[in-house]
Image (cartoon, helix red, strand yellow):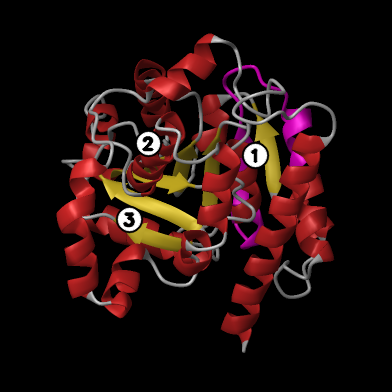
Amino acid sequence: MTRQINTIANIGSGTMGHATALQFAMAGYEVRLVELGGASLEAAMAKILAEANELAANGLLAGDDTVEDVLARITTTTDCAEGVAGADFVIESIVENLDVKRDVWKRIEQFAPEDAIFATNTSGLSPTAIQSVLDRPERFVVAHFWNPVHLMPLVEVVPGEQTAPETVDATFALMETIGKKPAKLEKESLGFVGNRIQLAVIREALNIVKEGIASPDTVDTVVENSLGLRWSILGPIASADLGGLDTFYNVSTYLCADLDNSPDAIAALGEKVEAGELGAKTGRGFYDWEGSRGAEVIGERDRKLMAALKASREGVDD
């Protein structure tokens, strides 16, 4: 069903879309960056240039590639037919709205080759629900990149009910080719894997704050200096094996019943949203992000992620 992948059609040029385009171009693919929603392609290319320069400064471009070489592989268009014609792999990163995604994919299918692979970079929408509008749903899969894309290795590869195994395998192989760490799910699940774990941790973290056990800053200090460090080396299940499953089981016998297991949306998040306190983007959330604080924290985060990325690539090269 699939063919050799040479050309990528990258639908969407926003926060995620511009960044996925860069990843494919860095790996040597011809990329058509297609914007169908009215966002500025010029702004997207400026972001791509900035991120490519950052990666180049840290020695993370392939071989003798220059930033100019990478950018030369990306062409831009607002024409869907032009963007997907002849593409071997089409990836979409548009608004997280099921109806909008379905409409866009129906348009894409009109113009894309019959054997092209289709991938959506959704954070948690059902691939089964999206692929249901396609004539050939077997070629549709989720490829969920994590933000910031140029620094985060993970891509979750998630099949829908009608996705062919070869579609999953080809997408997994492509993600490895562009230097990512793909994770193949056996079946779809709301939120996939990463967001399920992330929301479970946030739910309990905010429950600890609500119960007056610790402040947000203390909760973050605990995670940053224990679980965060440990899980960056070994995941929670391997860590449990190393710690002794008898110990973890014994703790679970008395602790699980005391953890927050509410099936409802997290109230503390809802209260902040209702108050217009959305975090760094509005200057206030659980922390005060006014002034330069947000930029400083993001800069420090990105420096540490870059260092980790360099270390992992050096390990591969060695």
**CB contact under 8 Å: marks 1 and 3:** no
Q: CA distance from mark 2 to mark 3?
A: 41 Å
Image quadrant in which the N terminus is located: bottom left
Determine if the magenta segment contains residue 13. no
**Would you call the spot at circle 2 few (<14 residues within 10 Å), some (14-19), or many (20 or more)?**
many
Comparing labels 2 and 3, the label whose residue is closer to the camera: 2
Which residue is located at x 16 percent, y 41 percent?
Answer: 161
- The part of the image, by quadrant, that contains residue 173 is bottom left
| Direction from residue 216 to residue 310 in the image, left or right | right
| Direction from residue 84 to residue 128 in the image, left or right | left
Asked whether 153 or 64 is in front, the reply is 153
Q: Position of residue 99 (x, y in %)?
A: 35, 16
Above or below, comparing residue 82 to residue 184 in the picture: above
- The part of the image, by quadrant, that contains residue 119 is top left
Q: Position of residue 87 (x, y in %)?
A: 49, 45
| Direction from residue 23 to residue 244 in the image, left or right | left
For the record, the magenta segment spans 24-49
Asked whether 293 or 2 is in front, the reply is 293
Which residue is located at x 31 percent, y 76 percent?
Answer: 243
Secondary structure under badge 1? helix
Q: What is the three-letter code of the residue carrying label 1?
A: His
**Would you call the spot at circle 1 few (<14 residues within 10 Å), some (14-19), or many (20 or more)?**
many
**Residue 316 in sight from this viewpoint:** yes
For disc 1, the marked residue is 18
Comparing labels 1 and 3, the label whose residue is closer to the camera: 1
Secondary structure under badge 2? helix
Asked whether 101 or 267 is in front, the reply is 267
For disc 2, the marked residue is 203
Q: CA distance from mark 1 to mark 3?
A: 25 Å
For disc 3, the marked residue is 2
